[in-house]
Image (cartoon, rainbow, N blue to C red):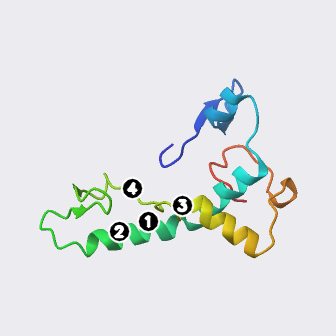
Amino acid sequence: MFDTRCFEVRRIDGSTTDFSVKPCLDGKAPSAFAETLRAMRTEVAEDIKQMKWEFFRASTHPDGKAPCALTGRLLSLEEAMIDHAPPKTFKALAERFLDGNKIVPSEALLTPTKDNQYSCRD
């Protein structure tokens, strides 16, 4: 599976399910807060991809590369990562949003996981 951080296992009966290595190694499920952050990231993923594509499309470099905002090094679309820089990290922005809207992450707000979900969507 591409564009995911999980793995897929095929059961003896031929059915499949996805899993993430970190919770398996930690021996515990992610917290409601961690799952809420992951769901929030999933919600903005397409917007972030669009912003990245537009940034590269607007580049004036003939090879289609664009300068990294942190290092200035020219990067291709495939090499570049887009994220929030400290102190306005994604986590900090999400916490501010949750606090401002008086939302307390809890298991009750989360959709139960299903086989082959690959992201926090129903």
Q: Are marks 1 and 2 in contact (CB under 8 Å)?
A: yes
Say which residue label 2 marks: 53
The amino acid on which the numbered mark 2 sits, given as a three-letter code, is Trp
The mark nearer the N terminus, 2 or 4, is: 2
Mark 1 → mark 2, Cα distance in angstroms: 6 Å
Mark whose residue sits in front, 2 or 4: 4
Sequence-earlier tag: 2 or 3 = 2
> Identity of the amino acid at label 3?
Thr
Quarter of the rendering containing residue 81: bottom left
Does the CB distance between marks 2 and 4 fall below 8 Å?
Answer: no
Residue lying furthest front: 87
Mark seen at residue 49: 1
- The label shown at residue 81 is 4
Identify which amino acid the numbered label 1 is placed on: Lys
What label sits on residue 89 in the rendered view? Answer: 3
- Which amino acid type corresponds to the residue marked 4 in the rendered image? Met
Per the image, label 2 sits on a secondary structure element best described as helix
Q: Which residue is more in the foreground, 47 or 92? A: 92
Element under disc 1: helix
| Residue 41: image location, x then y, percent | 59, 60
